[in-house]
Image (cartoon, helix red, strand yellow):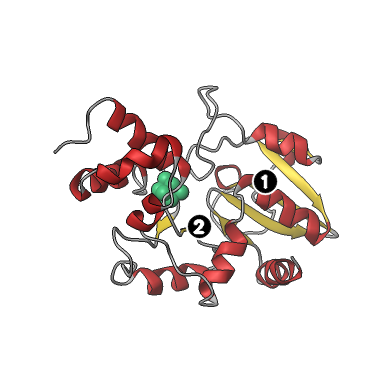
Amino acid sequence: MKKIEHYLEKKLAKGGLRIGQVQAVADGAEFLVFHSEDAGFFPQGSEGLNRNNLLVLRELSELREAVLRAACGDFRPLKYAPDLVGGWVFIAEGIGGLRMALETIYPAAVGLWLAWAAGELVPCSWREVLVRQTGMFRGLAKISDGVAASFFGEVCEKKGGCLREVLWGMDAGAKAGVGVTESLQEREKEGEIPLVCFEACNFLLSLAARRCAEGGEKE
Ligand code: SF4
């Protein structure tokens, strides 16, 4: 936890940080977290933020509620989808409060980024994830690579439904695409904490299982 907090402090000392659709800045002894759409271009501290127009949140339970639903009112099944609704500012007391706020919006994201940047995490391929599945996901092993790739395109690509950068491939030993590592490092230098994906998530597996059940697993 201390490692994450120390990292956040370093980012904030440079003017602020951006992660997914939100930004965070220091404001005196407090830290503000808000939707990028409510603050203009990054980084500009809290200057672009008009608190009078925003719902001020101080409790994590309030923040949890604010990020629970998309604009249409539907539950957001994927916390990394680009459908976060703004209109609020969360005020965190202390760096620990900021860490918890980011954890609420993007669970485990900062820790995963740090672990990957330090070379401590190896992505797990689609096939490796399938091998350890039981229950409703066990039948996914029969999906062809072509069909699986079409799921990834639909769900994981940025223009589709997820902000995370996919670092895993179809088979064991697969590596992130050419230039992905450099691009992530560059984004990090510019103030962002990139959202990275190490293995197929339950949201993707559920979609694949549903497609299988509907008979769409054949090419
Ligand atoms: S597998 Fe990763 S990139 Fe794809 S939807 Fe899930 S979290 Fe996002």
Categorize mark 1 by other alpha carbons within 10 Å: few (<14), some (14-19), many (20+). some
Q: What residue is rendered at 28% in x and 32% in y?
A: 212
Disc 2 on helix, strand or loop? loop
Cα distance between the residues tagged 2 and 1 = 14 Å
Is the residue indicated by label 2 positioned so its CB lies within 8 Å of ligand 1? no
Mark linked to residue 104 = 1
Q: Is residue 92 visible?
A: yes
Q: Is residue 40 left or right of residue 170?
A: right
Disc 1 on helix, strand or loop? helix
Q: Residue furthest bottom?
A: 118
Q: Which residue is mark 2?
A: 195
- Three-letter code, disc 1: Thr
The quadrant in which residue 173 appears is bottom left
Q: Residue furthest top?
A: 73
Q: Residue furthest left?
A: 219
Q: What residue is rendered at 66% in x and 71% in y?
A: 14
Q: What residue is rendered at 38% in x and 53% in y?
A: 131
Categorize mark 2 by other alpha carbons within 10 Å: few (<14), some (14-19), many (20+). many
List x then y, in percent, for residue 64: 69, 37
The quadrant in which residue 191 appears is bottom right
The quadrant in which residue 177 appears is bottom left
99 in relation to 208, above or below: below
Q: What residue is rendered at 44% in x and 42% in y?
A: 134
195 in relation to 90, above or below: below
